[in-house]
Amino acid sequence: MWLQVDPRSPTPVYQQIVDGIKAAVAAGWLQPGDRLPSVRDLAVSLAINHNTVAKAYQELERSRVIEVVRGRGTFVAQPGQRPPPDVAERMDKLRDSLRLAWIEAYHLGLEEAEFERMFWQAREDARGGERKEET
Amino acid sequence: MWLQVDPRSPTPVYQQIVDGIKAAVAAGWLQPGDRLPSVRDLAVSLAINHNTVAKAYQELERSRVIEVVRGRGTFVAQPGQRPPPDVAERMDKLRDSLRLAWIEAYHLGLEEAEFERMFWQAREDARGGERKEET
DNA sequence: CCGTGTGTACTAGGTCGAATAGTACACCGG
DNA sequence: CCGGTGTACTATTCGACCTAGTACACACGG
């Protein structure tokens, strides 16, 4: 399965699903039009409640990452169709996360050049990487 | 007062204090050796419990941002004295936050150049800015 | 030595979001 | 009709956060 979840993580399970699917779409694992597992199927796969999956799907639809068709299923949305309702707020959060990242980099003693390399490396990780071999 | 807190924010109050002081140090508001308000004084200023402030101070000391001297007070630490115990973990979190930022930038339809500008702008915001005029 | 101020530790309790379990409904397509 | 889809609702559990109050150990100046 291309998605995993850690129940003991401090970040909520539904948020992990949201992040995971957003990452899969951004990386190209999932193409526009691809069908996602049903809420109940995914819930069984992840060993969680179907309401938790539903909550994740609803947030993903609000962000226009997926499209929901009652009675048929959920699919990866075509980019740039209907604009999300809260772009401004999300941009602010994005700016703030970068600001906090700079602050943390400072306290970790990172040189500006090192942090910049980390920034571009993260771009690579976001579009393709994700090799995880453990044990 | 150079620090404010929003009790209704989703991010915990003690975390807001940690972030705020880290930001103040990184921006240069607070210099190494400067004394911080006592837990009780700051608690009164922010209208919160002193235990919450203490929790923030403890995390700040673990991160080697401040130094605590029993019976005397807390002070901004000299940079690079004793290394923090969890650098590796914090670096991983930093990398991950940048990865998530790239993913979010993708779903917001940001061009790479725009996002890079935002990245450098955040650097400026982290070292000085902070003008907040409301009302 | 005493008093004040420092950070720290502990218990008890309240609040809130996350997650579960279970059930029910409305929709689609064969 | 029937099976699968997302959705909605209640009830309940659980843990993090925060408060309130108290107590302790330490440092410094009188």
Image (tube, coloured by chain):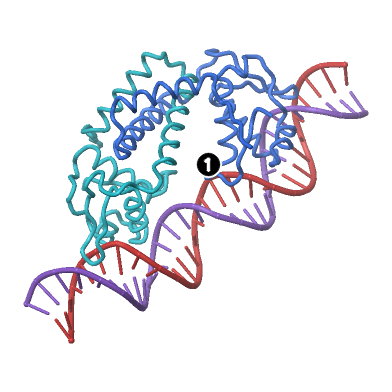
Chain colours: A blue, B cyan, C red, D purple
Q: Can you name the residue that lies furthest to the front here?
A: A135
Mark 1 crowdedness (10 Å alpha carbons): few <14, some 14-19, many ≥20: few
Frontmost residue, C27 versus A57: A57
Q: Position of residue A45 (x, y in %)?
A: 72, 35
Q: Position of residue C11 (x, y in %)?
A: 48, 72
Count of marks placed on residues: 1
Q: Which residue is mark 1?
A: A11
- Residue A7: which quarter of the image? top right
Q: Position of residue B133 (x, y in %)?
A: 23, 35
Label 1: element kind: loop
Frontmost residue, B46 versus B119: B119
Q: Position of residue B56 (x, y in %)?
A: 35, 53
Residue B129 located left or right of residue A77:
left
Q: Is residue B9 above or below residue D21?
A: above
Q: Amino acid at mark 1?
A: Thr
Q: Residue at x 33, y 27 (%)?
A: A114
Residue A44 located left or right of residue B42:
right
Q: Is residue C17 above or below residue D21?
A: above
Q: Residue at x 61, y 35 (%)?
A: A134
- Quadrant of the frame with the C terminus of chain B: top left
- Residue D22: which quarter of the image? bottom left
